[in-house]
Amino acid sequence: MTKKFQNNAVIFAESSLSGFRLAFVIGYFGTRHLPIFGYTLESPQSRVQSPELEEPTVPETSPDISLREFQLLIREMYFEKDVERGIDGTFMWLIEEVGELAASLREESSDEQAAEFADVLAWLATIANVAGIDLTTAVREKYGSGCPGCGRLVCTCDKTEKP
C-alpha cells in the first residue's frame, strides 16, 4: 500500500503472519526539499526507527557545514533563478567570480579573499545544481581513494603533470 504525505511516498508492507509492519518513506523533506529515505520496522515486541527521517540541519552554533548541506542551501536560495539562467549564463557568473578571486589573491586582505573563495564555491554549487550533479558524490568518486593520477593519498605524480 502506498500513501502520499506532503509530496513524499510512504510505502507500507505488512505481514499478517508474523505481525511485522515495515514502512519506507521516500521523497523530500521541509522547505529545503532535502532528499530523504527512511524506514520504520514494527514488531509485536519492538520498534526500530531510522534516524534519517529528520531534516538534516546545521546548528546555528556550529561553524561547520558539509559540502552537501552547502549545495542544498544554495539550491534552496537560488534554484529557480539558476534554472532560468541556464548552464551557460551560470558558467559566466562562475568565471566572473574566479576572476575576482584571482584579483583578490594579488591585492586584497585575507577576509576579502575568503569572501571570494566563498563566492566561487557558491557559483560552483549553483552550476552543479543546474546540471544535476551532486558535488559530494562527485568528489568522493574522484578523490575519495586518493589522487586520480597515481591513486595514492599523498600524490606522487610528477610536478610538471596535472594529476
Image: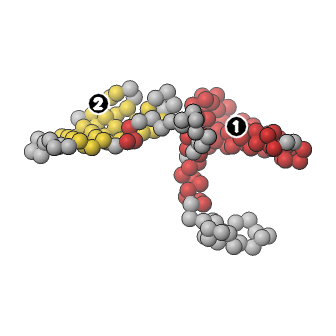
Residue at image location 56% in from the left, 56% down from the top? 140
Q: Measuring from the top left, give residue 119's x and y in whole percent.
A: 73, 39
Above or below, comparing residue 7 to residue 56 in the picture: above
Residue 33 falls left or right of residue 142: left
Read off the residue under disc 2.
Answer: 3
- Above or below, 162 relative to 37: below
| Res. 112 mark | none
Image point 59% across, 42% down: which residue? 65
The residue drawn where x is 27% and y is 34% is 2
Which residue is most to the left? 17
Give the label on residue 90, or none: 1
Residue at position x 27%, y 43% from top?
48
Q: Quadrant of residue 21?
A: top left
Q: Image check: 47 left or right of 135?
A: left
Crowding near the residue tagged with mark 1, few <14, some 14–19, many ≥20 C-alpha atoms within 10 Å: many
Task: Name the spot of residue 147 as percent of width and height, x first.
Answer: 64, 66
Crowd class of label 2 (few under 14; some 14 to 19; many from 20; radius 10 Å): few
**Element carrying mark 2:** strand
Q: Is residue 6 above or below residue 99?
A: above
